[in-house]
Amino acid sequence: MNTKNHETYDENKIRNFITGEALAANIGSLTGDASGKYKRRDFVAPLIEFCTDNCYNGKIGIVYGLRSTGKTVGMLQAAEELTARGHKVAYARFNYEESGMRDANAAIKRLTGEGFTHFFIDEATYLGGFLNLSAEWADSLVPQYRIKIVISGTDSFLLWLAKGTSLFHRYRQFSTNWNGFAEYRRITGNGYDEYKTAGGIFTSEPMPEFIRFALVENLIRSIEHYFDDANRTNEYTSRLYGIDAAVIYKAIISILKCAVEPDLKRHFIRNANNKNIMDLIARIKSCFEKGKNIYFYGLTNTLWRCIIMI
């Protein structure tokens, strides 16, 4: 098997896939620690089966889950197994606004010419044009080149949108969020009391911290990216631009009611001047003044303080 190292892994050169020795080094550093290799989650075996079923009928794999639920580790474990079986595997992890779908597709086509058959694309949602162009992977690249493409991304909201639009009927999903008790005990060695505390969600983080960075901060980043990237506009995200003030108003209230409302309040206050929040609040106030029927649930003093401070 050719283990030519096409690119040394470098965060500043994220347009390039890594293969061979560079990929092996990346796998070694991320799929284990001083105590040994991490145990495989239950979703890894079906993922490997998908990658080796010799079926190229226009579907890609999606490793789907919130932050810190094992997506990257599981993908790399699958990549390691495929490499051991003799397949030529390439892996890329993208950063926001640093590359686009056409860059990724050009690299995939180049590598298929060198015999590569399996492509794992982490943070695929950060590729410019992902929501509009990702269908090309399933409709064109997979059947034409007889390859397997597996993607993942922290922006689980955008992946959810893609599953219902550009990737509709074009994917097989491997979820990382939930785990049964048998899997939890096998992976962690902990008992049922710890499992109940985690609520069935696979994460090693304390639940309040997990809610803050995996749910709220994830949603905040999604909203910020929608403002920056026109390719992410659709019937859902257009509401974030203030087109339907009542919808975003209720969404803000719902988020503020969670355990991390101080973090969210500070974020909106800090970024109000450059995220059109002022216009949004003005529209909401205008709707009240005109007597429009805006429904809201559980309006708290915290929200009013937030509006006043903004």
Image: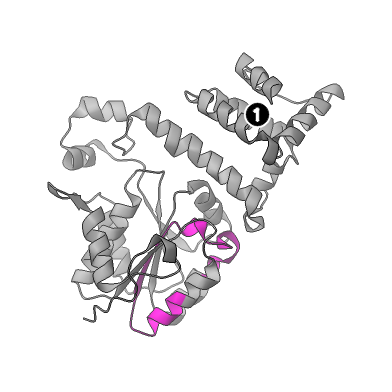
Left or right, 36 with reference to 239: left
Residue 287 at x, y = what percent?
81, 28
Residue sitting at x 21%, y 81%: 1
Secondary element at image label 1: helix
Across the whole image, how many numbered discs are drawn on residues?
A: 1
Amino acid type, mark 1: Lys
Q: Specify whether residue 307 is painted magenta.
A: no
Left or right, 81 with reference to 296: left
Answer with the quarter of the image where residue 119 lies.
Answer: bottom left
Q: Specify whether residue 127 is painted magenta.
A: yes
- Could you say which is closer to the camera, residue 166 or residue 94? 94
Left or right, 89 with reference to 262: left
From what the image shows, is residue 27 above or below residue 267?
Answer: below
Q: Is residue 2 visible?
A: yes
- Count residues near mark 1 (Cα–Cα under 10 Å), then give few for <14, some for 14-19, many for 20+: some
Residue 153 at x, y = what percent?
44, 53
Residue 82 at x, y = what percent?
24, 68
Residue sitting at x 50%, y 56%: 125
From what the image shows, is residue 48 above or below residue 139?
Answer: above
Q: Is residue 275 visible?
A: no
Residue reaching furthest to the top = 301
Residue reaching furthest to the right = 290
Residue sitting at x 45%, y 80%: 109
Residue reaching furthest to the left = 35
Answer with the quarter of the image where residue 232 lies.
Answer: bottom right
Residue 284 at x, y = what percent?
76, 29
Residue sitting at x 52%, y 23%: 262
Image quadrant containing the C terminus: top right
Q: Which residue is mark 1?
A: 250
- Could you say which is closer to the camera, residue 197 or residue 80? 80
